[in-house]
Amino acid sequence: MSAPHPTTAHEGADVHGDIHGDVSVDEIRLSQELSGTGAVAASADIAEYALRLGDDALILSQQLGAWISRAPELEEDVALGNIALDLLGHARSFLHYAGSYDGRSEDDLAFFRDEPEFRCAWIVQQPNGDFAQTIARQFVVATYMFELYSALRASSDETFAAIAEKSLKEVDYHRDHAVQWMLRLAGGTEESRTRIIRAIGDVWPYVDELFRDDDLIDRLGDAAARPSSLRPAFDRVVDTVFAEADVSVPAVMSSSAGGRDGAHATPLGHILAEMQVLARRHPGATW
């Protein structure tokens, strides 16, 4: 993830005058690659909020990446992989900004924090399950993120506004992709319909956490998007899609999820173990 400045063509020339290209991603200057990551360092509260947004995107990216070579059709290998890469880009932007508070890089925040230090919502931590379960989770999160980034474009924090502006177009595609699969599964075979209805019921307890306000949101004011204000637009999309799919919002109890405070569901530990093992076993390694 981290990225020092690339060498120039002149600096990359050997003694015989040959120019060798450098393809290492580590040689890309992050501040040039990503919008919204300027020179202004984040405050403690801004950094905490950026961690919430970055961790949601990072963990969901890791989850979706597991479908590559395992999706039900080749096109979905590509689609889910591309969505995962989009989310990884969002995570890099937010974590880079969060790290400007205390000098940590996005690599430090991704690979060298322990489970209680993560601020992701429980819904992104839920197991992939079958394809229907992943699509139901993706529908909820992409619909939420679309409303979140739409609101953040008006943030008084210029970095949040810039990241949201860049990310919104990508999340619009993520949402459309999930909606199309929701309708396809609900209107397909008896088996696909049974699975998507079951999947909706499995993920729905974790929806409310996305829309809970807290003291941090109060302190940030116009810099943040107030989660509760996003719920009406989210519900309108859900109602429209569910009506077309002829399914109902599940009558389930909300989870007591506390991911924003570092209290996580069991699956996060397994996700982090897989995601962080290489960086922790070989710290500072490059290729």
Image (cartoon, rainbow, N blue to C red):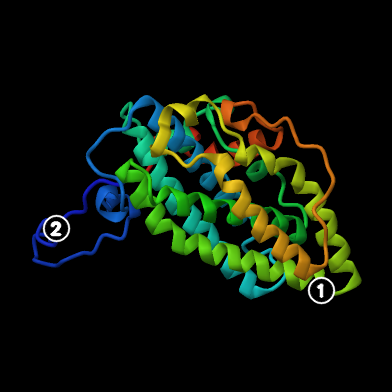
Query: Where 281 sits versus 150, above or below?
Result: above
Question: In the picture, residue 258 is in which quadrant?
Answer: top right
Return the residue found at the far right.
190
Q: Closer to the camera: disc 1 or disc 2?
A: 1
**Residue 100 image position (x, y, % from top left):** 31, 33
Whether residue 69 sits left or right of residue 34 in the image: it is right
Amino acid type at circle 2 is: Thr
Q: CA distance from mark 1 to mark 2?
A: 55 Å
Whether residue 71 sits left or right of residue 117 in the image: it is right
Can residue 284 be seen at all in this image of the molecule?
no
Question: In the picture, residue 177 is in which quadrant?
Answer: bottom right
**Residue 174 image position (x, y, % from top left):** 56, 63
Front residue of 78/93: it is: 93
Query: Where 100 sits versus 71, above or below?
Result: above
Whether residue 93 sits left or right of residue 241 in the image: it is left
**Residue 90 image position (x, y, % from top left):** 44, 51
- The reply to whether discs 1 and 2 touch (Cβ–Cβ < 8 Å) is no
Whether residue 46 sits left or right of residue 7 in the image: it is right
Amino acid type at circle 1 is: Gly
Q: Which residue is mark 2?
A: 8
Q: Which residue is mark 1?
A: 187
Q: Categorize mark 2 by other alpha carbons within 10 Å: few (<14), some (14-19), many (20+).
A: few
